[in-house]
Image (tube, rainbow, N blue to C red):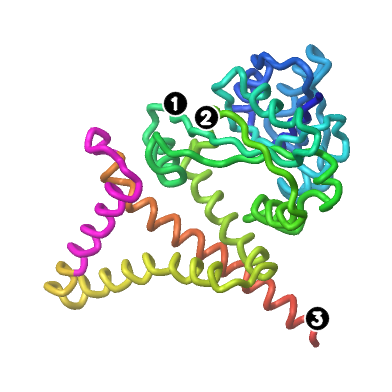
Amino acid sequence: MKISVIIPSYNEEAVVQDCLNSFLAQDYGDYELIIVDGGSTDRTVIIIEKYVRNYQNIKLLFERPRVGPANARNIGLKASNGDVIIFKDVDTVIEDFQYLRKIAEPFYDREVEVVYSKVQPILKTDKLLEKIGFYMQYGNKKAELKEAAFRKRILDKVGGYDATLGFGDDLDLSKRVTALAPKVGYAKPVRVCYPRVRSFNEFINRYLWYGRTSLDYIRKYPSRTSVLQLILSFVPIIIVTVVLYGMIYHTIYGLICASGMLVCLYGWTFFRKQITIKEAHVVLLLPFFWVLSKVIFWIGFAQRFILKTRGNFMRGR
């Protein structure tokens, strides 16, 4: 049974080699790697082309013009020859050399359309910003995530990814696949080193992108839960604004508010994210990066909302 692994890429010269090597180390032989590049301006394509020349099971495709990861995955899906499809990000490193074999086993039941696997995110870095990004996204080192692999025929039925979405494109795909009530299988747990934030500029761009693209997902799925989550994400900004106002105009009130905010933030850090006191340098900075991520998210969301509103107004004239 052939497996197709589809990987979008864009300016990832620093990590693409580690990603490809981790798949080439797999003990499962019948698979192909399809990398879909969105017009990288660094050495990403040059690096991938070397692998294409040396390995027959690696393909390089191009997304022109660049729309986004969802569209790139659809391009890869159309070009795939596998019975089973796995989608991965290019900065993912597989730590389990039996990963593909574990995913394949439940699919030997021909009625199984979707396979879920428990994944333990692995933190392999000494860099402070990468640690902060990891804990913000995954919490403690013992966290478990759930990933899905798909039979190609069910992806063809739902039409693949919705290329108009950015944030939430995987949730959207899962909702449409689940609506078909497919037979589900479960794979053995695996270990994966997940995407990490490697620079402050990347941190800003990531949360701007979340903000700019989340509006489209909310418009497609306008549930009370999604709206409530959006509103709650604004709470940290309100808290910080109130504290700053109090510190500027009412010193005692501001100090009380600031103390209360710090207690809440550090309580969240210890109990929600389960960070140990041994990582004190991360503990001290994590709450502030968390608040900053919300501010950046809302800047991106506001930009997108203004553009949408202006476009609707111009069409109505």
Please tell me whether residue 94 is drawn above or below residue 39 in the rendered image. Answer: above
Q: Report how far apart the C-alphas of labels 2 and 1 lie in the structure.
A: 7 Å
The residue at which mark 1 appears reads as: 124
The label number, if any, that marks residue 315 in the structure image: 3
Q: Mark 2 or mark 1: which comes first in sequence?
A: 1
Helix, strand or loop status at disc 3: helix
Q: Amino acid at mark 3?
A: Arg
Res. 166 in view: no
Q: Amino acid at mark 2?
A: Cys
Residue at 72% across / 49% down in the picture? 68
The residue at which mark 2 appears reads as: 193
Please tell me whether residue 159 is drawn above or below residue 191 in the rendered image. Answer: below
Residue 275's quadrant in the figure? Answer: top left
Helix, strand or loop status at disc 1: loop
Q: Main secondary structure of the magenta part?
A: helix
Residue 276 colored in magenta in the image: yes
Q: Which residues are magenta?
A: 257-281
